[in-house]
Image: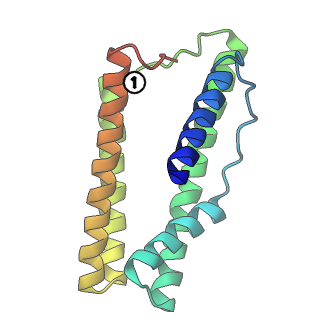
Amino acid sequence: MKEFGKNLLFTIMVLIATGSAAQEGPRRQHPPREFNPEEFAARQTYALHRALQLDSIQFQAIMLMNYADAVTMQDSMKVRREHREKMRASGESLKRQQPSEEERKARMELEKQRREIKNRQMKQILNAEQYNKYLKLQEEYSERKRNRREGQGRMRREGRVPKF
C-alpha cells in the first residue's frame, strides 16, 4: 500500500510539472552547442569498444577513423551554418527548403560511398566476429532511425507535432 501511495504521489508530481511547463510560453533559445570532433569521435569509439570489446590497437585505429569522420562532419556543418547566415543577411526565408531531386540523390550517393568506405576500413580493423556484430549494430541503428522518422511523420500528419 505504501508503494501505491508513492507511485500515486510521483504521478501527480509529474502531471503538475508537465502542466506548468506547458504554460511557460515560448522557450528561450539556447546558443548552439559547439561541435567538438574529439568528443564526438571519443563517444562513438567508446560505444564500439563496449559493444565489440576492442583491443588497444583496434581502439586507436577506430578512434582515428572516427575523428577524421567528425572533422569532415564539422566542415559540412560549417558550410550549412554559413549558408543560413547568408540567407538571414539577405532577408530570405529560413523555412526549411527541400533540396532538389539531383541534390538529394547526390547526398544519398555521397553518404552511401562514405558508409562503404567506413565498412571496408572496419572490416580490415575488426576480426570476423566483431565485424558481423558491427554490421548488426549498424542495422539496428538504421532501423531505430527509420522508426523515429516515420513516427514523427505520422505525428505531424495527425497534428500532434508542430511544423517548424
* Location of residue 164 in the rendering, given as x and y in whole percent from the top left corner: 52, 18
Q: Is residue 124 left or right of residue 128?
A: right
Residue at point 46% right, 18% down? 97
Residue at point 23% right, 75% down? 132
| Crowding near the residue tagged with mark 1, few <14, some 14–19, many ≥20 C-alpha atoms within 10 Å | few
Residue 162, placed above or below residue 36:
above
Q: Amino acid at mark 1?
A: Pro
Residue situated in front as seen by the camera: 83 or 27? 27
Question: What is the quadrant of residue 14 in the picture?
Answer: top right
Residue situated in front as seen by the camera: 37 or 78? 37
Residue 107, placed above or below residue 15:
below
Residue 83 visible at all:
no
Q: Say which residue label 1 marks.
A: 99
* Location of residue 70 in the rendering, given as x and y in whole percent from the top left corner: 56, 58
Residue 121, placed above or below residue 41:
below
Residue 7, placed above or below residue 161:
below
Residue at point 71% right, 47% down? 34
Q: Which structural element holds mark 1?
A: loop
* Location of residue 72 in the rendering, given as x and y in whole percent from the top left corner: 54, 54
Question: What is the quadrant of residue 108 in the picture?
Answer: top left
Residue situated in front as seen by the camera: 33 or 115? 33
Label count reads 1
Residue at point 70% right, 15% down? 25
* Location of residue 85 in the rendering, given as x and y in whole percent from the top left corner: 69, 25
